[in-house]
Amino acid sequence: MTQQRITSGELIDEATLTLEELARACSVEAEWVIERIERGLLADGSPYVASWRFTSHDLTRARRICQLERDFEAAPELAALATDLIEENQRLKERLRAAGLIEG
């Protein structure tokens, strides 16, 4: 009989990015990020620029929206909608994996 070590843990996303860092990581101007935040497409739409801090999820979402806008010349709202669908698809696949209904 073989023994298996089970390691459990919690993923903590403590590192955050500033507006400038997020823009640089996406190769866009800060104004691009601000515009999408004000439209409610990124982050929480908070009007307080000084308090904006962005997580890895925000970075992934911003990069995906930017790529869709560039590659398909999509309007920001359409790119955000496509991103919402991609994110939902990923969440559903994770739930199916957790339930043992599909393999990872």
Image (tube, helix red, strand yellow):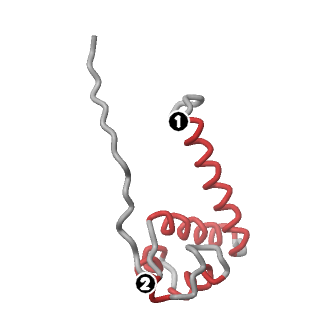
Identify residue type, mark 2.
Glu
Q: Nearer the viewer, residue 32 or 67?
A: 32
Residue shown at the point (68%, 75%) measured from the top left = 76
The Cα–Cα distance between marks 2 and 1, rounded to whole angstroms, is: 37 Å
Please state the horizontal and vertical placement of residue 31, each as a whole percent of the image.
55, 88
Residue drawn 58% across the image and 40% down it: 95
| The N terminus sits in image quarter | top left
Residue 90 vs residue 12, the one in the foreground: 12
Residue extending farthest top: 1
CA neighbours of label 1 inside 10 A, class few (<14), some (14 to 19), many (20+): few
Is 7 drawn above or below residue 90 in the view shown?
above
- Left/right placement of residue 81 relative to residue 46 reads right
Q: Position of residue 28 (x, y in %)?
A: 51, 81
49 vs 65, left or right, is left
**Up-down relation of residue 80 to residue 31 (above or below):** above
Q: Position of residue 96 (x, y in %)?
A: 59, 36
Q: Is residue 17 above or below residue 8?
A: below
**Residue identifier under label 2:** 20
Secondary-structure class at tag 1: helix
Q: Earlier in the sequence, mark 2 or mark 1?
A: 2
Q: Point out which mark residue 46 bears.
A: none
Disc 2 packing (10 Å; few <14; some 14–19; many ≥20): some
Q: How many marks?
A: 2
Relative depth, front residue between 47 and 62: 47
Which quadrant of the view contains residue 87? bottom right
Please name which of the two marks, 2 or 1, marks the residue nearer to the observer. 1
Under circle 2, the secondary element is helix
The structure residue drawn at horizontal position 64% and vertical position 62%, both measured from the top left corner, is 83
Name the residue nearer the viewer: 45 or 67.
45
Residue placed under numbered mark 1 in the picture: 98
Circles 2 and 1: CB atoms closer than 8 Å: no
- Residue type at tag 1: Ala
